[in-house]
Amino acid sequence: MSEFQGCELPEDLFYDLDYVWVRPEGEGIFTIGVTDPAQTMSGRLQKARIKKVGTQLAAGRHVATLESGKWAGGVPVPFAGEVIERNEALLEDPHLINIDPYGDAWIAKLRAEDPEHALDSVHTGLEAIEALQAWIKRYDVQCMRCSD
């Protein structure tokens, strides 16, 4: 795992180069969450709304809306698909994203409409890590994880 200015950046994930990560799970299923620098910039998350299972989403539509005391925003999906699971724990305690954005605090799992091209608009590997480091520098982010 890469780390930059305290921000964890797993090399095995795919990124939209803004604030969303995607992990392929196989069989056309993908898990979506928000990055460490994004959770840091948002502040302590207080509310999460996640689309219901069965919801069809077009690429770019929001699978979730997150809110903190200083920020509210949507979590866009990089491909069209159907929500097949949502992280119910986040509905009760959205602050989990501030603690473990790449682990227990994933947001939703989607079945891609076109799995072969689901990752066409996201990036991985060295290219993604370098772009995310530039993003972190541009916004002068020093990542911190909240505690329970």
Image (tube, rainbow, N blue to C red):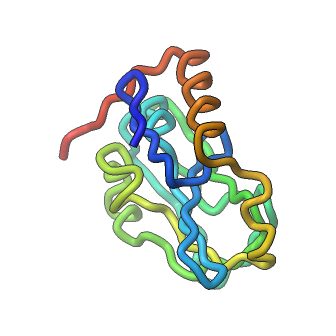
The answer to whether residue 90 is visible is yes
Residue drawn at (56%, 52%) of the image:
21
Rendered location of residue 50, percent (x, y): 54, 65
Q: Nearer the viewer, residue 140 or 122?
A: 122
Find residue 98 and report its image quarter: top left
Lateral position of residue 89 relative to residue 86, left or right: left
Residue drawn at (63%, 62%) of the image:
63
Q: Which of 2 and 77 is in front in this view?
A: 2
Q: In which quarter of the image is the N terminus?
A: top left
Residue drawn at (43%, 70%) of the image:
87
* Residue that lies at the very extreme toward the front in this rendered image: 126
Q: Which of 46 and 4 is in front in this view?
A: 4
Lateral position of residue 125 relative to residue 68, left or right: right
Residue drawn at (76%, 64%) of the image:
79
> How many numbered marks, from 0 up?
0
Lateral position of residue 110 relative to residue 70, left or right: right
Rendered location of residue 36, percent (x, y): 43, 39
Rendered location of residue 112, percent (x, y): 72, 76
The answer to whether residue 18 is visible is no
Above or below residue 28? Residue 132 is: above
Above or below residue 20? Residue 30 is: below
* Residue that lies at the very extreme toward the left in this rendered image: 148
Above or below residue 134? Residue 127 is: below
